[in-house]
Image (cartoon, rainbow, N blue to C red):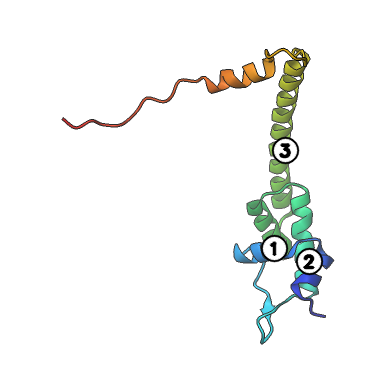
Amino acid sequence: MDHSIGRAASASGVSAKMIRYYEGIGLIGRARRSSAGYRYYDEHDIQTLRFVRRARDLGFSVEDIAKLLELWRDAGRSSADVKRLAQGHIAALQARIEALESMRRTLEHLALHCHGDDRPDCPILDDLADGAKRPPAPSRRRFSS
């Protein structure tokens, strides 16, 4: 059974806009078109879109999803290749978690030291301003004589 893009979006959980985007970047194959130019998707297309959505839900990049799709379609694949890709993603997620935790700790510290009253002094703004006070990069403009 063929589905219009709207039905494909509903069935897969991927918006029509994202389906068109994924087609445009070549992540998924081009949809078949009716004589009127409407896109149509079959069950295999829907399953591929569900695969992409699940991979996105797990935070994989578009590039990694393309690799995962290639491995998924390759019956002769080695599961070690899939595991290696997943472990790389886990390491990247862990690094992001650590960075977010560091940001959270910094903001908690700043909020704890902010009086939160009618006074204008604010350690949160002071910290943000300190980061903005970096001297500008030297100009590389050459002057002609």
Q: Quadrant of residue 37?
A: bottom right
Neighbour tally class for label 1: few under 14, some 14-19, many 20 plus, Cα within 10 Å: few
Which residue is more in the foreground, 51 or 4? 4
Which residue is more in the foreground, 72 or 114? 114
On the rendered structure, is 97 left or right of 127? Answer: right
Report the amino acid beneath label 2: Ala
- Residue wearing tag 3: 93
Residue 94 position within the rendered picture, expressed as x and y whole percent measured from the top left: 73, 34
- Residue wearing tag 2: 9
Q: Is residue 75 visible?
A: no
User: Which label lies toward us, 1 or 3?
Assistant: 1
Q: Is residue 35 above or below residue 63?
A: below
Q: Is residue 25 visible?
A: yes
Report the amino acid beneath label 3: Leu
On the rendered structure, is 47 left or right of 60? Answer: right
- Residue 17: assigned label: 1
Q: Earlier in the sequence, mark 2 or mark 1?
A: 2
Distance between the Cα atoms at labels 3 and 2?
A: 28 Å
Neighbour tally class for label 3: few under 14, some 14-19, many 20 plus, Cα within 10 Å: some
Circle 1 SS class:
helix
**Pointer 1 with pointer 3, Cβ within 8 A:** no
